[in-house]
Image: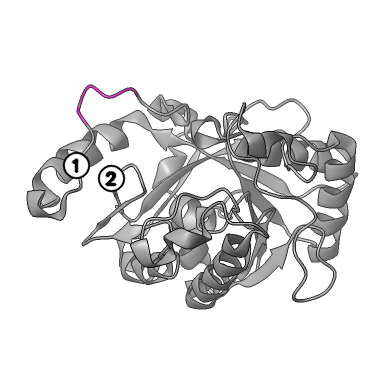
Amino acid sequence: MTRLLFVHAHPDDETLATGVAILHHVERGDDVHVLTCTLGEEGEVIPAEHAHLEGAEGDPLAEHRHGELAGAVATLGVTSHLLGVPEAGERPAYRDSGMVGSAAFSHPRSFAGSDFAEVVAMMRSTIERIDPDVVVTYDPEGGYGHPDHIRVHDAVRAALAEMPSAPTLFVTLTPRSWVVEDREWLASHVPQETGYAAPSPTEAFAPSVVDDDLVTHAVIDPGVVARQQEALRSHATQVVVGDGWFALSNDVASRLAGREGYALMDPSTGEVVATDDQAGTERPGLVEGAR
């Protein structure tokens, strides 16, 4: 049995970005943990009945999203942790930073604006306590450039680089060919009457979308999509779930294809580590051949 730790910035990231890998490894009997660094206080609320939580004094959205996270991780079947929280019921040490230039970014508890050395020390102590064989987090651009995602990547790498016997590090990357296929699928599978749109074929790719040969590993397991959708429904303030797709507050649909790409990374250099079989996307899980 392998112990894996998935490190994320906000509730729902665990299921959106790495839900396939999480469920795949849970189902094969591995010990899977999720570390969440903030409670997503700056999330954009979709349902009208919860709109009053967004931006309200005292951050009631934090407690609501904490409950959503609890529901999702229960469905995923993982052990959940909050960064800097020694006791159940406490809030994490840091707050959702929002985007660069927002008022939230200047908040005293802003995760991305906090002392980096302090974050790294907290990250290292948490990783050492959980003692995983494998750590998984975002790529250097944080998927789409969110400052909290980038801070997670940087802090995880720095923490692992300090450890004399560090876990194997994987970061999320998506092969460009998959995105092209997914956009074609969405165009014919998202009903117009839902009000959600498939992304344009000419829309720019996110920073985490890369040439296929940069993806050293993939988890391909369509059988877990039903449970991934169930977990996503727990995050009802942030996500609308369709049949094989989801949408965020931007009303643009994304496919739930049962596959996720990853790259093995050297935490000290930030370089992707070539594998003996660079066609690693055929491997069914992260831990096969990891070390």
Q: Check residue 74 for magenta coloring.
A: no
Main secondary-structure element of the magenta-colored stretch? loop
The stretch in magenta equals 200-204
Q: Which residue is mark 1?
A: 197
At label 1, which amino acid type do we have?
Answer: Ala
First along the sequence among labels 1 and 2: 1
Relative horizontal placement of residue 195, taking residue 10 as reference (left or right): left
- Marks 2 and 1: in contact by CB < 8 Å? yes
Element type where label 1 sits in the image:
loop
Dot 2 falls on a residue whose secondary structure is loop
Vertical placement of residue 253 versus 46, above or below: above
Q: Quadrant of residue 245?
A: bottom left
Q: Pick whichever, 34 or 272, lies toward us.
A: 34
Lateral position of residue 152 relative to residue 289, left or right: right
Which residue is at the front of the view, 172 or 115? 115
Residue 89 in view: yes
User: Residue 248, percent across and down?
Assistant: 36, 49
Q: Which residue is mark 2?
A: 251
* Mark 2 burial class by Cα count in 10 Å: few <14, some 14-19, many 20+: some
| Label 1: how many Cα within 10 Å (few below 14, some 14–19, many 20+) | some
For the image, the number of numbered tags is 2
Q: Name which residue type carries label 2.
A: Asp
Pinpoint residue 237: horizontal percent, then vertical percent: 43, 61
Q: In the depicted view, which residue is nearer to us: 117 or 64? A: 64
Q: Position of residue 263 (x, y in %)?
A: 55, 37
